[in-house]
Amino acid sequence: MMLEGKSCLVSRSLPSYCDPDSDWAFLLSGSTSVGEKAYVAGGTDASGKILSSAEMYDSVTHTWTPLPSMNRARKMCSGVFLDGKFYVIGGVTNNNQVLTCGEEYDLNRGSWRVIENMSEGLNGVTGAPPLIAVVNNQLYAADYSEKDVKKYDKLNNKWIALGKLPERSVSMNGWGLAFRACGDRLIVIGGPRTSIGGIIELNSWVPDEQPPVWNLVATRQSGNFVYNCAVMGC
């Protein structure tokens, strides 16, 4: 997670720090950052219990502030900051039930609102958390099952298919595929694999009113299947 240009570990069970030379850990939470603050919600505790709790981390004071709990406990969810609010989307709850709703946290009111069907079709029990990104205050998603790029219609609470992901951005139920925002661009990182290795391709596209036309920025050989990534300096 990026906080004012620093890569920071965010975890409920471990001290929080910003140290690139230390061991890193993560929980199955939805999280996002804006300025010097990080917002985290859901996930699991040390015993595997699925949580509804939420917290805000201030990287200046190095302190956690509890937030009101979400309406529904969830793990394997995703978080974004949109329209000045913290959104937690999708995930899995008890008994491996896939959640198709999202929740919106209003920082001014200090309360959560459930948005039904906000993440329908974006994740599954064994799949990756929803692959979402915000560009110019618009929410986009990579539908890894259909290989579509979608845009969220805020007024009508529905996803609109814009076109396809890059042809070679293959994944295993979303694992092995990254979908990020970088300035005014969407970035897709992923590529084909064989039994002896694979290729990572980085593609970018500036969203407009036309179907996506992806620009291949870089490629490299890969011996691993799953990487994590953070965007810096856009």
Image (tube, rainbow, N blue to C red):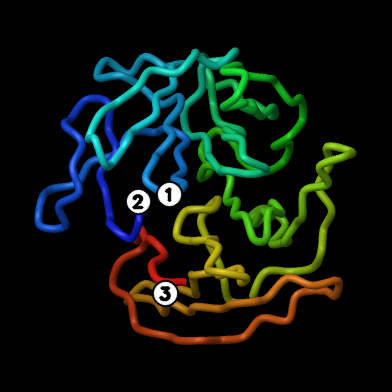
Q: Residues within 10 Å of mark 2 (few under 14, many from 20)?
A: many
Relative placement, left or right, of 165 versus 233 is right
Check disc 3 and report the residue beneath it.
Answer: 194
Relative image position of residue 74 (x, y in whole percent): 51, 22
Alpha carbons under labels 2 and 1: distance apart = 6 Å
Alpha carbons under labels 1 and 3: distance apart = 40 Å
Local SS, label 3: strand
Check disc 2 and report the residue beneath it.
Answer: 3
Check disc 1 and report the residue beneath it.
Answer: 35
Cβ atoms at labels 2 and 1 below 8 Å apart: yes
Q: Nearer the viewer, residue 189 or 83?
A: 83
Q: Residue furthest left?
A: 21
Q: Residues within 10 Å of mark 3 (few under 14, many from 20)?
A: few
Relative placement, left or right, of 49 versus 191 is left
Judge depth for marks 3 and 2 and give the one in front.
Answer: 2
Cβ atoms at labels 1 and 3 below 8 Å apart: no
Relative image position of residue 163 (x, y in whole percent): 79, 68
Amino acid type at image mark 2:
Leu
State the image quarter where residue 97 is shown. Answer: top right
